[in-house]
Image (cartoon, rainbow, N blue to C red):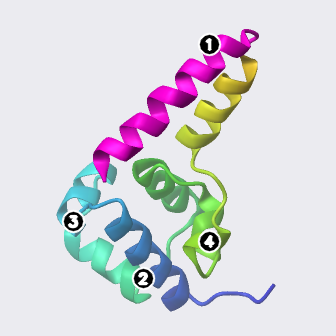
């Protein structure tokens, strides 16, 4: 795996932020910086340290690894997705699992 530049990591930040439907201002407010600082991160003008990467990942509800991959298809699960899956798998009653599955698939159909 190649080392990504600050510009490439910033591009991934832009992609993840827009996928989360957050403006620069909204993300900036969540992490306590200015929208100009978010712009500098996204363009690669400023590097993000490990603390900032973790903070932004948490604000976007994505794993930190998301900043180091090229496409959405290769992204690992978000923390909330993993929690949902782990919780589902921990349900001992198969009927309850089936009910939850029906609820989620129906909710998806209604959203379309």
Say few, some or many: other residues with alpha carbon within 10 Å of mark 2 (under 14 / 14 to 19 / 20 or more): some
Disc 4 to disc 2, C-alpha distance: 27 Å
Q: Which mark is residue 53?
A: none
Residue that label 4 marks: 73
Residue 86 occupies quadrant: top right
Q: Residue at x 35, y 59 (%)?
A: 20
Q: Position of residue 92 (x, y in %)?
A: 76, 10
Q: In the displayed orientation, state which residue is furthest to the right.
A: 1
Disc 4 to disc 1, C-alpha distance: 30 Å
Residue 99 occupies quadrant: top right
Residue stretch rendered in magenta on the structure: 92-112
Q: Which mark is residue 96?
A: 1
The N terminus - image quarter = bottom right
Q: Residue at x 56, y 71 (%)?
A: 72
In the rendered image, residue 5 lying in the magenta stretch gets the answer no
Say few, some or many: other residues with alpha carbon within 10 Å of mark 4 (under 14 / 14 to 19 / 20 or more): few
Q: Position of residue 41 (x, y in %)?
A: 39, 78
Q: Residue at x 66, y 25 (%)?
A: 88
Q: Earlier in the sequence, mark 2 or mark 1?
A: 2
Q: Earlier in the sequence, mark 4 or mark 3?
A: 3
Does dot 2 land on a helix, a strand or a loop?
A: loop
The C terminus - image quarter = bottom left
Residue that label 3 marks: 23
Q: Earlier in the sequence, mark 3 or mark 1?
A: 3
Residue that label 2 marks: 46
């Amino acid at each position: 795996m190649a080392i990504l530049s600050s510009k490439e990591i910033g591009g991934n930040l832009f992609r993840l932020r827009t996928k989360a439907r957050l403006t620069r201002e909204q993300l900036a407010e969540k992490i306590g910086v200015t929208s100009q600082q978010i712009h500098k991160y996204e363009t690669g003008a400023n590097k993000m340290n490990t603390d900032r990467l973790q903070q932004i990942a948490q604000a976007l509800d994505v794993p930190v690894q998301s900043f180091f991959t090229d496409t959405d298809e290769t992204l690992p699960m978000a923390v909330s997705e993993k929690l949902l899956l782990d919780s589902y798998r921990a349900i001992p009653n198969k009927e309850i699992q089936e009910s939850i599955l029906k609820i989620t698939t129906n909710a998806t159909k209604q959203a379309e």
